[in-house]
């Protein structure tokens, strides 16, 4: 499973399920079942988490938005824009402009890895950051979105964020996995929990 994860991380585009299964010496069916049992999420969800990280990094440094999209492993602009609300919570142009014109609510919740900052817009999650120091996480958010209107969520928002983070721990990935893989799984599960709640029409 670790070999398959590293293949996902280093591939320019998300590998096909058959390619990942072959790397593990398993059939497609058994690979998918075992991957989910070991990692706590599906191969596609893991790939989505890694690609979300990559596109955030690329948008901060690439010459153009199109370059960032393709360098992050998306095979078309359309595919990225269909998922952009779940990844950025805003338009790529606003993201590159430090969140200009965007209102962000955030909270820091306790988690198995220390703390996790959950920041959302009215479109979706814009930042899921894990770290040991809550103040440092808030500083990271300010550095990422200096032009946004940032608001520390009220008690209801903080309680909701904690519930989503708690839900993201179950099922947990195998504790024998490398720490960076377990963290990627956790961040993706938090993102999925936030998106699911938003898609149900409930406030984040």
Image (cartoon, rainbow, N blue to C red):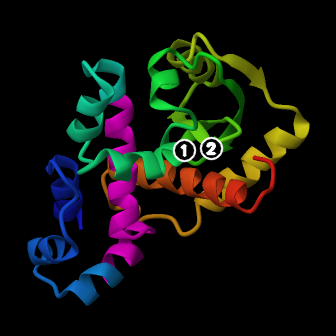
Q: Name the residue under label 2.
A: 124
Q: Neighbour class for label 1 at 10 Å: few (<14), some, many (≥20)?
A: some
User: Among all residues in the image, which is located at the extreme right?
Assistant: 155
Q: Position of residue 121 (x, y in %)?
A: 67, 35
Asked whether 114 or 145 is in front, the reply is: 145
Q: Neighbour class for label 2 at 10 Å: few (<14), some, many (≥20)?
A: many
Residue 165 falls left or right of residue 48: right
Q: Can residue 179 be seen in this view?
A: no
Asked whether 40 or 177 is in front, the reply is: 40
- Residue at point 43%, 64% (across, down): 173
What is the secondary structure assignment of the residue under circle 1?
Answer: helix
Dominant secondary structure (helix, strand or loop) of the stretch shown in magenta: helix
- Residue at point 31%, 38% (across, down): 54
The quadrant of the image that shows the N terminus is bottom left
Image: 69 above or below 163: above
Q: Report, in whole angstroms, how far the alpha carbon at label 2 lies from the one at label 1.
A: 5 Å
The span picked out in magenta is: 34-57
Q: Name the residue under label 1.
A: 85
Q: Are marks 2 and 1 in contact (CB under 8 Å)?
A: yes
Q: Where is residue 142 in the image (x, y as percent from the top left)?
A: 59, 14
Asked whether 79 or 4 is in front, the reply is: 79
Residue 62's image quarter? top left
What is the secondary structure assignment of the residue under circle 2?
Answer: loop
Asked whether 123 or 172 is in front, the reply is: 123
- Residue at point 64%, 25% (across, down): 134
Q: Can residue 43 be seen in this view?
A: yes
Residue 23 falls left or right of residue 105: left
Reading the chain from its start, which is encountered first: label 2 or label 1? 1
Residue 146's image quarter? top right
Q: Position of residue 37 (x, y in %)?
A: 40, 77
User: Among all residues in the image, which is located at the extreme front?
Assistant: 78
The question of residue 167 being in magenta is answered with: no
């Amino acid at each position: 499973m670790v070999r398959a994860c590293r293949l996902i991380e280093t591939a320019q585009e998300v590998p096909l399920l058959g390619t990942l299964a072959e790397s593990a010496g398993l059939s497609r069916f058994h690979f998918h079942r075992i991957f989910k049992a070991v990692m706590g999420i599906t191969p596609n969800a893991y790939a989505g988490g890694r690609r979300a990280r990559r596109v955030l990094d690329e948008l901060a440094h690439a010459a153009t938005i199109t370059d960032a999209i393709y360098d992050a492993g998306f095979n078309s602009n359309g595919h990225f824009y269909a998922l952009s609300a779940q990844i950025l919570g805003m338009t790529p142009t606003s993201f590159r402009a430090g969140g200009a014109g965007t209102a962000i609510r955030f909270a820091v919740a306790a988690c198995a890895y220390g703390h996790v900052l959950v920041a959302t817009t009215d479109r979706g999650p814009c930042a899921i950051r894990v770290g040991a120091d809550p103040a440092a996480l808030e500083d990271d958010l300010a550095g990422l979105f200096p032009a946004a209107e940032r608001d520390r969520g009220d008690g209801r928002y903080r309680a909701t964020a904690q519930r989503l983070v708690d839900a993201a721990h179950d099922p947990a990935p195998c504790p024998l996995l490398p720490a960076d893989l377990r963290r990627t799984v956790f961040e993706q599960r938090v993102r999925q929990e936030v998106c699911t709640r938003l898609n149900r029409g409930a406030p984040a």
